[in-house]
Image: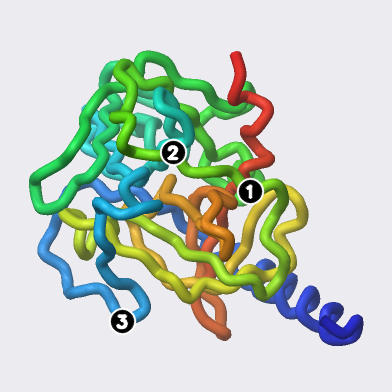
Amino acid sequence: MHRSAARECRRAGTRLFAAALALLSFLPTTGARAEPSPPATRHRVDISAKPWNAVGQVNTMAYSRCTGALIAPRLAVTAAHCLFNRANGRFLAPGSVHFVLGYDRGRYTFQTTASAIRMDPAQDGTRSLAAAPRDWALLELADPAPESIEPLGLADALPPAESLLTAGGFGRDRAYALTVADDCRALAGGGNALIVARCSIVQGYSGGPLIDDAGRLAGISVAIGKTEAGEVLFGVPVSAWRGRLER
């Protein structure tokens, strides 16, 4: 990309990033409701095919429903705010967090609970832009995923501006099936702490994967915003929790 074009891209991304702050919202959903079908930019995928067979629902005893991604046979990643019980101001116990792979209209291929949860030590359940880079949680699974399901590979770096990303999740408008938005474009403006992308997703996509154009996990979706130029998502990059993969 030409230098002047790259500078303008960064400026545009920064403007979008700043404009979206006032409209920041987080993405869990609290149960399946009858909603209109998702727009054409989001569509269903084959949950049995790679990489989508490694994307699962995260269901909790607090009746929240989010999305997660398998990154090792006994490890999944999701958004930390999905595990926070706002009714009592505490994070849920691992055993009350369920991870379900292959979910489609009530059927699934694998289900287990978390045996332990790793989060940023500073994570306290706060929902704000400043706290968004800490909005990740690693679920240690009580049972290993089937060998037939290959965990997602991890990207080495943040996606460059204007690169293509695909967001996946169990959105509230079609919570019984995995849908994806495969036309997301990364923007400048999030620095090294957040992924910012022009993309249209909905509640339920929290913790869902952001897949780069090489098929690797670049990060997870945690929040959305709206600007005059359209909708944007905010994601936590792999770099935020890569150092916590080994205990």
Q: Position of residue 229 (x, y in %)?
A: 57, 84
**Rendered residue at 54%/49% (across/down):** 217
In the picture of the structure, the residue carrying the numbered disc 3 is 40
- Circles 2 and 1, Cβ within 8 Å, touching? The answer is no
Please state which amino acid type lies under the numbered disc 3. Ala
Height in image: 51 above or below 127?
below
**Rendered residue at 53%/37% (across/down):** 136
Query: Which mark lies nearer to you, 3 or 2?
Result: 2
Q: Alpha-carbon neighbours of circle 3 within 10 Å: few (<14), some, or many (≥20)?
A: few
Which of these two is toward me, 215 or 29? 215
**Alpha-carbon span between mark 2 and mark 1:** 13 Å
Residue 81 visible in the shown view = no
Q: Earlier in the sequence, mark 1 or mark 3?
A: 3
Query: Which mark lies nearer to you, 1 or 3?
Result: 1
* Quarter of the rendering containing residue 36: bottom left
- Circles 3 and 2, Cβ within 8 Å, touching? The answer is no
In the picture of the structure, the residue carrying the numbered disc 1 is 155
Q: Position of residue 175 (x, y in %)?
A: 20, 55
Height in image: 175 above or below 79?
below
* Quarter of the rendering containing residue 173: bottom left
Q: Position of residue 213 (x, y in %)?
A: 57, 65
Please state which amino acid type lies under the numbered disc 1. Ala
Q: Alpha-carbon neighbours of circle 2 within 10 Å: few (<14), some, or many (≥20)?
A: many
The local secondary structure at tag 2 comes to loop
In the picture of the structure, the residue carrying the numbered disc 2 is 151
Quadrant, the C terminus: top right
